[in-house]
Image (spheres, rainbow, N blue to C red):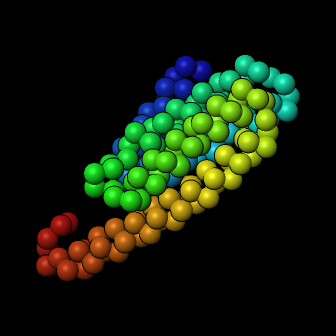
Amino acid sequence: MSSARNAAAAYKQQDIRSESPLALVASVYELVSSEIGKARAALAARDWATKGRAVHVAGRGLSLLQCSLNVEEGGDVAHNLDRVYAYLLVRLSAAHLANDDSIFAEIADHVKELGSAWRAAARGHDSSRRDATDADRRAEPIGVGG
């Protein structure tokens, strides 16, 4: 079983290394969304340990998103995202401490909306990159590249 887990981890590492930065951000949003869902399910089941672990991982994901911002180059967008992530982290703590599913639902809605925007941006970026690569291949002289 351990070798299967190691193989899965190796494949995941390779996926991460080959992803664009936009796709990586979208993946973090997917992780946060999944963990919020786990926290909500655990809250409903009164499984406090699972809820705590899910909140912890979701919080780390949101912190990762916040820490990866480049506020010098990102301008207003980066500053606004910084405030959004700070707000979501505060709300995550509130939901966890109060065992309040409505706050978890609010966070889930925000994360879903932001994640959708990042996934769309990643798809557009990947599509543009593929188009540019295809154009480069068409422009290569005969006998070059392979």
Note whether residue 62 is visible.
yes
Note whether residue 31 is visible.
no
Residue visible at 46% across and 64% down in the picture: 121
In this view, 29 is above or below 45: below
Q: Nearer the viewer, residue 137 or 79?
A: 79
Residue 12 percent across, percent down from the top left: 47, 38
Residue visible at 79% across and 43% down in the picture: 102
The quarter holding residue 100 reads: top right
In this view, 120 is above or below 34: below
Residue 127 percent across, percent down from the top left: 41, 70
Q: In this rendering, would 84 be left or right of 10?
A: right
In this view, 7 is above or below 102: above
Residue visible at 62% across and 58% down in the picture: 113
Q: In this rendering, would 2 be left or right of 100?
A: left
The quarter holding residue 94 reads: top right
Q: Quadrant of the C terminus?
A: bottom left
Q: In this rendering, would 123 be left or right of 131?
A: right
Q: Quadrant of the N terminus?
A: top right
Q: In this rendering, would 122 be left or right of 45?
A: left
Residue 115 percent across, percent down from the top left: 56, 55
The extreme right residue here reads 45
